[in-house]
Amino acid sequence: MKDKYEVGYSKPPKATRFGNRPQPNRSPGPRRATEAAVDLAATINGPMKVSQRGATVRVHPHEAMMLGLAKKGLDGSIRAIKEFFLECKKAGLLEAPPLQQTGGFILAPKGVPSQLAARMVRTVGLPPWPDDVYAEFKAEYDADCEHIETLTAIEEAKQNDQGK
């Protein structure tokens, strides 16, 4: 009974039952890549050609993406506007610049003359100041004060001589 096998409708011959013959419309097998591996980072960071105002220019892909998002956003695409502002936020472009202090009070340490404190704030910054820097500025300030006193004394002597 094993030797007898009837060939017929939905009973193919045993030799070719499971597709042992070549298929005419199929490719011979998986193709191997013939090109060298593509450097993905170089592709992403390389300049792209973009048409701007009728001229073709080369720009960074990120810049091209931002230009495209801006254009779509101006056309009314809400999603493009959200993406554009998200990228701007990532780049730190939406943060307000730090405000420079234009006025206020600065508390100088006790015993520091106000003129010396003002000079040190302008050149060194806000207190507390390092001891060696303070000593250097204090010596310069004392020398300037002595020089001013000497000049004031000379000027008073001249005025007294002219007044007599």
Image: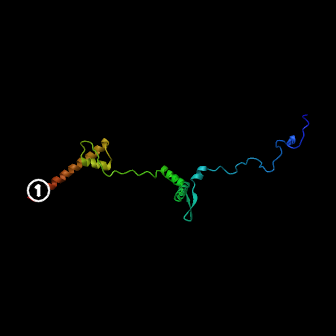
Q: Nearer the viewer, residue 158 or 115?
A: 115
Decide if residue 49 is on the left or right side of residue 107.
right
Residue farthest along the front direction in this orientation: 9
In the rendering, at what x and y percent does residue 92 appear? 46, 50
Figure coloring: rainbow
Residue 62 picture quarter:
bottom right
Image point (54%, 53%), residue name: 79
Q: Looking at the image, is 19 positioned above or below residue 157? A: above
Residue 140 visible within the image: no
Where does the N terminus fall, quadrant-wise? Answer: top right
Picture coordinates of residue 90 (x, y %)? 49, 49
**Which residue bears the numbered disc 1?**
160
Residue 134 image-quadrant placement: top left
3 on left or right of 144: right
On the picture, is 22 further left or further right than 93?
right
Residue lying furthest top: 1
The residue nearer to you, when weighing 40 against 100, is 100
Q: Please tell me which residue lies in front, 57 or 134.
A: 57
Image location (x, y in percent) of residue 70: 52, 57
The location of residue 27, given as percent across then percent down, is: 77, 49
Graded by Cα atoms within 10 Å as few (under 14), some (14 to 19) or many (20 or more), the crowding at tag 1 reads few
Is residue 152 visible to the viewer in this orientation of the structure? yes
Rendered-image quadrant of the C terminus: bottom left
Q: Amino acid at mark 1?
A: Asn
What's the residue at 26%, 46% (across, down)?
A: 139
Q: Nearer the viewer, residue 72 or 111?
A: 72
> Helix or strand or loop: what does disc 1 sit on?
helix
Question: Which residue is situated farthest in the bottom direction here?
Answer: 54
